[in-house]
């Protein structure tokens, strides 16, 4: 069988093809399961043994040659598949858009607050949501019989008497101070849990950010300066801030921090209860008992701490009147941010 003659005939046939349909027919005619190449290779077993290798090699060369010729021809008028695709797709039809996701407003504000404190030299530290009773209470100067313990009541784990869901992020203070030596400046974001009845301003789970600074010579004025930078960065340069005496078992002295109402600018409105002020966080100088519990020398070191509920900050910042909206996953609400 003269392969060279077959090769010339095939080259001539492919060169004369003028349509994609004709090219596809040639593909099946020469390269198909019952095509010319298949018939050639089927004759190899009947050839003399000394001719089989040469003939097989020539058949493979011819197969590659045909494939290349068809590929070159396809470039001139495209493959039948691409032509069919172009005919079946209406490029004038609108595409299917992919909705772009956004950060949840709580996550957005947590990131914003953490970045403010990072710029002031703080580090972001996280801790476990399942805590020991000591870290959550006793280590923070809240012994079992202390009356303020009711305010920080939480959920205990069944069969684990000393483990609970943390009721504030303050246990990370204990963990951080035990593992590090002063100077220390950290902020701690995270979820906390309390058995509160659910209403427009309370949930059994919410988010907090705790702040802590310990070093030699830390004073209440340092706390005031740090919190003033924070408040103006979040709520605007025109707000006013005040400290009110308060009680927290882990700080002494302690203070609640208010800002002038961002709605009425301090004149008085329903949002601020006609008082002109909005409470944003609690703060104070770290109680000496807490410093002693972690092994710090109270004659050498002092520090301050503060803590805020993130949902409250977000509600004030964006004028939201119901905390439950954050967790209902209603896209009509979440798309606003």
Image (tube, helix red, strand yellow):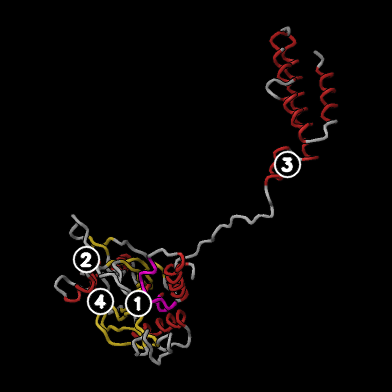
At horizontal 27% and vertical 65% (from top left) the residue drawn is 166
Residue contact between numbered discs 2 and 4, judged by CB atoms under 8 Å: no
Kindly identify which residue carries mark 1.
215
Q: Earlier in the sequence, mark 2 or mark 1?
A: 2
Labels 4, 1: front one? 4
Badge 1 crowding class, 10 Å Cα cut-off, few under 14, some 14 to 19, many 20 or more, is some
Q: Is residue 146 left or right of residue 248?
A: left
Provide the major secondary structure of the magenta segment.
Answer: helix
Labels 2, 1: front one? 2
Q: Earlier in the sequence, mark 1 or mark 3?
A: 3
Badge 2 crowding class, 10 Å Cα cut-off, few under 14, some 14 to 19, many 20 or more, is some
Q: Nearer the viewer, residue 312 or 115?
A: 312
Kindly identify which residue carries mark 3.
83
**Label 3's element?**
helix
**Label 1's element?**
strand
Q: Is residue 193 left or right of residue 161?
A: right
Q: Earlier in the sequence, mark 3 or mark 4?
A: 3
Mark 4 vs mark 1, CA separation in Å:
17 Å
Tell me residue 140's x, y (percent).
Answer: 24, 72
Q: Earlier in the sequence, mark 4 or mark 1?
A: 1
Kindly identify which residue carries mark 2.
134
Mark 1 vs mark 3, CA separation in Å:
75 Å
Quarter of the figure that contains the N terminus: top right
Tell me residue 327's x, y (percent).
Answer: 38, 65
Visible in this render: residue 142? yes
Tell me residue 68's x, y (percent).
Answer: 77, 32
Residue 251 vs 134, above or below: the answer is below
Kindly identify which residue carries mark 4.
250
Where residue 273 sits, quadrant-wise, is: bottom left
């Amino acid at each position: 069988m003269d392969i060279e003659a077959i090769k010339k005939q095939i080259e001539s046939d492919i060169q004369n093809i003028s349509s994609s349909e004709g090219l596809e027919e040639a593909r099946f005619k020469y390269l198909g399961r019952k095509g010319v190449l298949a018939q050639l290779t089927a004759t190899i077993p009947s050839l003399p043994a000394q001719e089989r290798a040469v003939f097989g090699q020539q058949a493979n060369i011819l197969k590659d040659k045909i494939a290349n010729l068809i590929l070159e021809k396809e470039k001139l008028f495209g493959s039948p598949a691409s032509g069919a695709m172009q005919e079946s797709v209406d490029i004038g039809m609108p595409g299917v858009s992919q909705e772009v996701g956004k950060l949840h407003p709580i996550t957005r504000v947590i990131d914003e607050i953490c970045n403010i404190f990072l710029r002031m030299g703080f580090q972001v530290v996280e801790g476990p949501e399942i805590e020991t009773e000591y870290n959550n209470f006793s280590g923070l100067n809240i012994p079992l019989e202390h009356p303020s313990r009711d305010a920080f009541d939480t959920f205990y784990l069944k069969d684990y008497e000393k483990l609970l869901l943390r009721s504030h992020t303050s246990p990370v203070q204990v963990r951080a101070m035990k593992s590090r030596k002063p100077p220390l400046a950290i902020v701690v974001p995270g979820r906390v849990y309390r058995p509160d009845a659910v209403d427009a301003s309370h949930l059994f789970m919410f988010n907090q950010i705790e702040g802590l600074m310990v070093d030699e010579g830390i004073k209440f004025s340092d706390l005031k300066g740090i919190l003033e930078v924070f408040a103006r960065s979040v709520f605007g340069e025109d707000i006013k801030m005040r400290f009110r005496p308060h009680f927290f078992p882990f700080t002494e002295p302690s203070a609640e921090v208010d800002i002038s109402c961002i709605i009425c600018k301090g004149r008085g409105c329903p949002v601020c209860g006609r008082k002109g002020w909005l409470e944003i966080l609690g703060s104070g100088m770290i109680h000496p008992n807490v410093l002693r519990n972690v092994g710090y020398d109270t004659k050498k070191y002092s520090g301050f701490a503060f803590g805020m509920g993130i949902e409250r900050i977000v509600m004030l910042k964006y004028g939201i009147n119901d905390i439950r909206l954050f967790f209902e996953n209603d896209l009509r609400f979440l798309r606003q941010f």
